[in-house]
Image: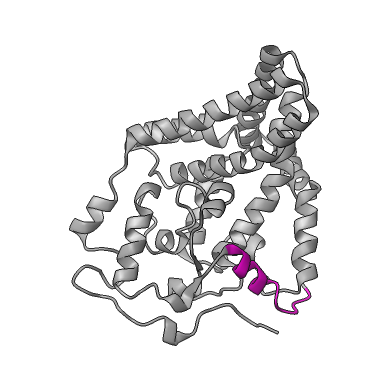
Amino acid sequence: MVDTLVPDLTDRPEVFPSERFLPNGMLSPELRSQLRQIDDVRNALSVIGLWAFVIGLVWLTAWSHQWWVALLAFIVMGPVHVRFAILMHEAAHKILFTKSAINDFVGKWFIAYPAFIPISIYRRGHFAHHREEFGPDDPDIVFYGGYPSAPRVLLRRLARDAVGISGWKNFKSLLLANKSSAGRRIALPILGIQVLLWATSWVATGDWWIYPLLWFLPWMTQWRVLNRLRAIGEHGGMQKNADRRATTHNVRQRPLARLWLVPYNTGWHLAHHVDMGIPWRNLPRYHQELIAAGYITPGITYSSYTALWRAAASGSSAN
């Protein structure tokens, strides 16, 4: 039985402050300013490229009218929703675009609302998560709390995600928000964008089922599974601690995981929690800085997400 996945203190040496780092693990102001540069053009191309991929996938499915193409497209749309969530996460941190107005406009209307996310609410909750992982105001603990657990616990949670039970709870909350004026201001734009996406795909392809199959259903099912697995890969089995290495995992990044589960460098999650102001394109560089400083060690590094999930399901928790 495993009680915690927190690395031993021997694998978490105290290395800050240093010539390059401040006591909190952030780089010195001059070095940090270099890594905080936002590449507006490339980020815009990332957003455009993501939508181009979605449009291309929709066109291919509608053009082929083959069931197996539709099935493959449905499967691929799971990682597509992951990409929308990660780009939204960047916008929530205000590091997707340099200008705040552009960051918030694109993040809201072209990323968050299409992905059913009320970004203003997400931003407040997510900053609470960064202030204190596993703290009383951390809203994300529902995804990664309670580990290590028995394998059946993880499988039961993933099964609820896979069949849409978790997704329906989220969608139902969005619908019920319309009962109040404050809720309507948040929910109606999101629901309006969904109607627009459905109508546009229907008119463009002549097939009413394109939107439900390739957008709504993957969000209700696949995305839930991938989101939970990623959350466990980020914080599962850890605990409240001032040392980020005790709250956040470090996992070796492999091509398949980066393609399917942790795109846009989000797998360098420990680096992100040490300094959440560094944009996604620069996280690998910052990660290397932390390795060179001796902050990230082999002893705290999992060889793969599979190894981490196996460890997270090695306990006997009944919750």
Seen as rendered, the residue at the extreme bottom is 10
Horizontal and vertical percent position of residue 3: 65, 82
Which stretch appears magenta?
A: 305-318
Horizontal and vertical percent position of residue 138: 56, 62
Q: Is residue 303 visible?
A: yes
Which image quarter holds the C terminus?
bottom right
Residue 258's place in the image compared with 23, above or below, is: above
Which image quarter holds the N terminus?
bottom right
41 and 181: which is toward the camera:
41
Residue 35's place in the image compared with 119, above or below, is: below
- Identify the residue at image location x=80%, y=69%: 152
Horizontal and vertical percent position of residue 188: 65, 29
292 left or right of 67 in image = left
318 left or right of 43 in image = right
Residue 103's place in the image compared with 264, above or below, is: above
Residue 145's place in the image compared with 261, above or below, is: below
Q: Is residue 178 visible?
A: no
- Identify the residue at image location x=61%, y=80%: 4
- Residue 309 located within the stretch drawn in magenta: yes
1 left or right of 33 in image = right
- Residue 19 located within the stretch drawn in magenta: no
**Residue 85 sits in quarter:** top right
- Color style of the picture: one colour
75 left or right of 108 in image = right
**Residue 150 sits in quarter:** bottom right
Horizontal and vertical percent position of residue 84: 55, 39
- Identify the residue at image location x=54%, y=63%: 234
- Identify the residue at image location x=33%, y=35%: 40
180 and 236: which is toward the camera:
236
